[in-house]
Amino acid sequence: MTDIAFGMRGKMRPQIRPAEAHAFVSEELFTTDWLELPESRVVQFRVGTFANEDDADMDQCLTNPVGFENVDGFMLVSLLLPAHFNNNPIGEPGSFGLNYALENVRFPAPVFLGNRVRVVCTLTDVAEHSKGVLVTTHNVMELENSDRPCLVADWAVLLRTVDSL
């Protein structure tokens, strides 16, 4: 395992400038390393999103058959952030991304404490936008030892530069 979440251990491809990214549509941008989902991180997420016994009525959630050990789908969505921060090669000095859209989000398989996941990201579209370049990726979060992914989502990010503000 690497020291950072979803690290690539030096396997990342060279940086791709947003203006040249259209040449990589339909290509896989990256596959992350496996990341274990320990109880400590899941509990931190629950506290940070007020989905814990102190802030919400969790009786039904914690007493169902999957209960406490089930990892929330919204935590899985949030894991796309470090996967992309640490691995997405599209960008250039001075550029930054703004969330634009998250579409077609599905959770085909449940995830439990201690499971390991990884993200496979494919570039699906690059479009000029009046405020920058709109980059859309198809993200599949694989669940180790499962035939089904645990998350599938299309994520559009508007890449901008300070000059475009």
Image (cartoon, rainbow, N blue to C red):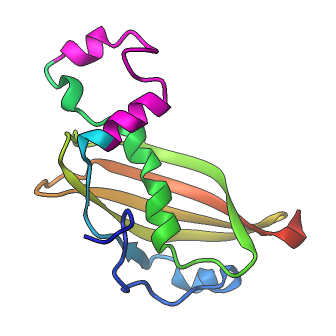
Q: In this view, does 11 lie to the left or right of 150?
A: right
- Residue in view at x 53 percent, y 55 percent: 155
Pick the front one: 59 or 152 = 59
Image quarter hosting the N terminus: bottom left
> Residue 11, percent across and down?
36, 85
- Residue in view at x 19 percent, y 13 percent: 63
Position above or below: 80 against 25: above
- Please say whether residue 4 is visible from this viewpoint: yes
Image quadrant in which you'd find residue 67: top left
> Residue 105, percent across and down?
43, 44
Q: In this view, does 76 lie to the left or right of 69?
A: right
- Please say whether residue 107 is visible from this viewpoint: no
Q: In this view, does 144 lie to the left or right of 50?
A: left
Query: Please, which residue is most extreme toward the left here?
Result: 145
> Residue 137, percent across and down?
50, 64
Magenta residue check for 148:
no
> Residue 38, percent across and down?
24, 46
Magenta residue check for 51:
yes
Region of the chain picked out in magenta, as a range: 41-64
Image quarter hosting the C terminus: bottom right
Query: Please, which residue is most extreme toward the bottom here?
Result: 14
Pick the front one: 138 or 38 = 38
Position above or below: 154 against 12: above
- Residue in view at x 52 percent, y 47 percent: 103
Please state the total of marks drawn on the protein image: 0
Image quadrant in which you'd find residue 13: bottom left
